[in-house]
Image: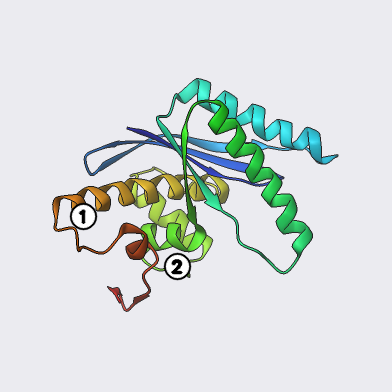
Amino acid sequence: MRILGIDPGLRMTGFGVIDVQGQSLRYVASGVIRIAPGPLPPRLKTIYDGINEVLAQYQPDIAVVEIIFVNVNPQSTLLLGQARGAAITSLVAGGLTVHEYTALQVKQAVVGTGRAVKEQVQSMVQRLLSLPGVPSPDAADALACAICHAHARTMTAAAASQSPTQTPVSALLGARVRRGRMR
């Protein structure tokens, strides 16, 4: 299965593509879609068109997009939400199923703590995918989204093979971590 992760942004939208076979993850590609400053509508079109190019080149099976959080500035949150909407529209128009995870869930799945900083995410992505160098922050976040979904799929499959009273995957991804142990 080929998974495309997207980290939406209005200046740079990160993308990361991985292949998953069983529990094995393989890096395919990553990068950023650079968006020129200016009026919002052309910027959203750049995101839409850029993701269409990524879809055409890498032909992923599914997509994962990070859910934005509400930050201190509501205007920034609204603008970022529009960038996210352009990305999701491009993915759905391309025929993909889109999965969504919060930044906390992504960091939890990749680093082991939802409070990880960007450098920790970059380092773990590098390790998990055996990359020769550290990916850029936006590309690392997109790859982390894809890795998060790969791990969620593995946990879902494991849970399905267990009794129906097992903990749901969403609860595992949102679990708090202290001293390396799930609580």
Q: Residues within 10 Å of mark 1 (few under 14, many from 20)?
A: some
- Quadrant, the N terminus: top left
Q: Residue furthest toward the top?
A: 56
- Answer with left or right where residue 63 lies relative to residue 90: left
- Answer with left or right where residue 70 lies relative to residue 121: right
Q: Which residue is mark 1?
A: 159
Camera-side residue of 157 and 119? 157
> How many numbered callouts?
2
Relative to 61, say whether 167 is above or below: below
Task: Tell me the quarter of the picture where residue 45 sits.
Answer: top right
Task: Tell me the quarter of the picture where residue 113 sits.
Answer: bottom left
- Quadrant, the C terminus: bottom left
Cα–Cα gap, marks 1 and 2: 22 Å
Q: Amino acid at mark 1?
A: Ala
Residue at (26% x, 53% y) in the render: 155
Camera-side residue of 136 and 167? 167
- Secondary structure state at the residue bearing disc 1: helix
Q: Which residue is mark 2?
A: 114
Residue 84 position, x and y percent, is: 63, 45
